[in-house]
Amino acid sequence: MKKNSDSLGTASISSLLIKQAVPASIGILVMSLNIIVDTIFMGRWIGPLAISAITVVLPVTFFIAAIGLAIGIGGSSVLSRALGKGDDIKALKVFGNQTTLTFLISGILAILGLVFQDYAINFFGADDSFRDLALTYYRIVLYGIVMLAMCMMGNNVIRAEGKPKFAMYAMMLPAIGNIGMDYILIDVLGYGMEGAAWATFISYAMCFLFVVWFFLFKSELRLTLKSFILDSKIVKEISGLSAVTLARQGVIAILTILLNNVLINTGDAIDVASYGIISRALMFALFPVIGVNQGFMPIAGYNYGANKFQRVREAINISVKYSGILALGIFILIMVFAEPFVSIFISNKVGQEAGTIANNAELLKRTPNALRWVFAATPVIVIQLIGGSYFQAIGRVIPALLLNLTKQGFFLIPLVIILPQFYGVFGVWISFPIADVLSTTVTGYFLQRAVKKDLVE
């Protein structure tokens, strides 16, 4: 029987990449808009310190959600290659084990996060000016974080099946719901930070319900209870590749904690709010590049599993070309429109307190140039992204792990520790483009060497 996933090995690479990347990009765009709008609502309706609060909460929620993302991406690499070889039995086992692992690990971490919430908030960089706001948001969001982890896992499996539109819907539905609930709970009902947190919780639940519906009624993967029983061999294979994404996401969480603490120590809460805006901009502005990267992985994994190496080479070349053009456009837009972008996070309501007015003015003064520095090397990052994803897609755990850790782990974290000692907060911002250039150079070298050695038919 011809399966939907078969097209990954037969259709033209360009059309496949567009088919995979456009829905992924739209899904990421809507999800990013959700986070952007969430932050705008908090900045305009609660105040700049609310942005600081959600910024320090981000590492723990990000890391737990990354459990699902890591198991989803790592397991889906195994699943894509199994589908490419026609091994449907293994594909079912992989998906069942992904589900069990995601639920157990994210659940345990969520419980620990709630038990040690006071310690966690202090460790993540909160100070007295916004600690209560951060705790309110953290506590409620963690109630639903397991659902988000399951969604992140399921979304990658949906894409590995060759059904990117459903993966897009899984990201769009909760994002749209969250924006609506934000408006109702924060602005109309006036629940402030608590309303923002419950809106986020509801969005997680909406995504989870959609993913469950897909696998019950639309998926080619028909699971049985036996599929959920952990198989040591499958778990080992999933874990090896999941470790790549988890390590990268874990390093990002550590980096965020470090940044929050460095910014609060060398600057103040407004600098933390600036980074909160910049981190949203990174997710939002790079959505088409990330979409191409996500679209590339199942194509590369499937064709590598089917020994169609010329198609893998073509996928690499086209992905780098498309994402490079997109990255250049993003760079130009950020350089030109940094001030208007930052201004949308700042309230202009009449009757604000003097402290809030001063905070708003300072935020608008500091953030645009910081944003430009962080995006200064954007045109070159596509090689680093595609290169790391290539090794992950074909199941090369060690090079995938090391290359995915290159930017944040090997370069950015040391730079963030060292440069602010000489340049203050400015040292934080210039660390980003330096790390981008260094990591791209390293990844480009290893990707070129691997293509010449491995992709020969």
Image (cartoon, grey):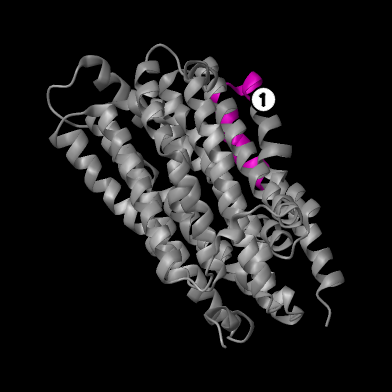
- Is 282 one of the magenta-colored residues? no
Residue 78's x, y, as percent?
68, 64
Residue range in magenta is: 417-436
215 shown above or below 9: above
Pick the residue in front: 221 or 122.
221
Pick the residue in front: 92 or 132.
92
Q: Residues within 10 Å of mark 1 (few under 14, many from 20)?
A: some
Residue 157's x, y, as percent?
55, 63
Pick the residue in front: 16 or 414.
16
Mark 1 lies on a secondary structure that is helix
Check disc 1 and give the amino acid type. Answer: Ile
**Residue drawn at the location 69% of the way across and 75% of the way down:** 87
For residue 159, side relative to residue 85 (left or right): left
For residue 192, side relative to residue 457 (left or right): left
202 shown above or below 379: above
Secondary structure mainly formed by the magenta segment: helix
290 shown above or below 298: above
Image quarter of residue 216: bottom left
- Is 430 one of the magenta-colored residues? yes
**Considering the image in quadrants, where does the N terminus appear?**
bottom right
257 shown above or below 28: above
**Which residue extends farthest front?**
225
Pick the residue in front: 181 or 106.
106
For residue 147, side relative to residue 136 (left or right): right
